[in-house]
Structures are given as structure tokens and as C-alpha cells.
Image: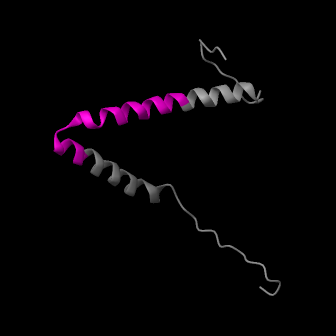
Amino acid sequence: MADGSIIARRRRISIDSFIFPSVSFLYVCIESNSISGNVDEIAPLLSMFFLMCYGFVNLACALQTLLKTPNWRPRFKYYHW
């Protein structure tokens, strides 16, 4: 450290360290809503989640096509971009 530079130490984060907390959080969210007995409250949230997933897949396909990425080779039967 004589030259005044700061060297950041990298911490290794494995995928396994995120699995248990995320599954636990999801379990608590699902159980708390199912225990309350009102499934209609999560229907709009769930439908928006799937619509966003569909939209981001379409956005990714459109960007890959418009940018003319060389490794983009769609094999969809009805690909229209």
C-alpha cells in the first residue's frame, strides 16, 4: 500500500448461498397468502409477473435482431422479427 492504491478483496459467492433464503422467502409469501384465504389478491401480481417475463423475452429477441448479433440464430418456427 505504499503507492496509495486500494486493492479490493473479492468474496466468492456461490449460487448455493442464495437458494435457501430465496426459497424460504417464497415459501413464507405463498403460505401467508394461502392461509389468509384470499387468492384473488395475488392474481393481478401473478399475471403482471408473467406479462413482464413475456415482454422481456420479446425485448431480448427484438434487440438481438435489431443489433444483428452474429451469434443470434433463432430456430423458432414462427419467428417474425
Q: Residue at x 72, y 75 (%)?
A: 7
Most extreme residue toward the right is: 3
Left or right, residue 47 beside residue 71: left
Q: Nearer the viewer, residue 60 or 18?
A: 60
**Where does residue 34 sit, x and y in percent of width and height?**
20, 42
Look at the image and tell me in which quarter the N terminus lies. bottom right
Left or right, residue 60 beside residue 65: left
Q: Residue at x 53, y 29 (%)?
A: 55
Question: How many numbered marks have been drawn onto this rendered protein structure?
Answer: 0
Q: Residue at x 66, y 25 (%)?
A: 62
**In this rendering, is residue 69 above or below 77?**
below
**Where does residue 40 sit, x and y in percent of width and height?**
24, 33
Q: Nearer the viewer, residue 31 or 15?
A: 31
Residue 12 included in the magenta stretch of the image: no
Q: Can you tell which quarter of the image residue 21 is in? A: bottom left
Q: Residue at x 45, y 56 (%)?
A: 18
Most extreme residue toward the bottom is: 2
Overall secondary structure of the magenta stretch? helix
How are the residues colored? one colour
Residue 35 included in the magenta stretch of the image: yes
**Where does residue 63 sit, x and y in percent of width and height?**
68, 29
**In this rendering, is residue 19 above or below 42?**
below
Look at the image and tell me in which quarter the C terminus lies. top right
Left or right, residue 34 beside residue 17: left
**In this rendering, is residue 19 above or below 73?**
below
Left or right, residue 7 beside residue 29: right
Please report the bounds of the magenta region as a residue range. 31-55
Q: Can you tell which quarter of the image residue 56 is in? A: top right
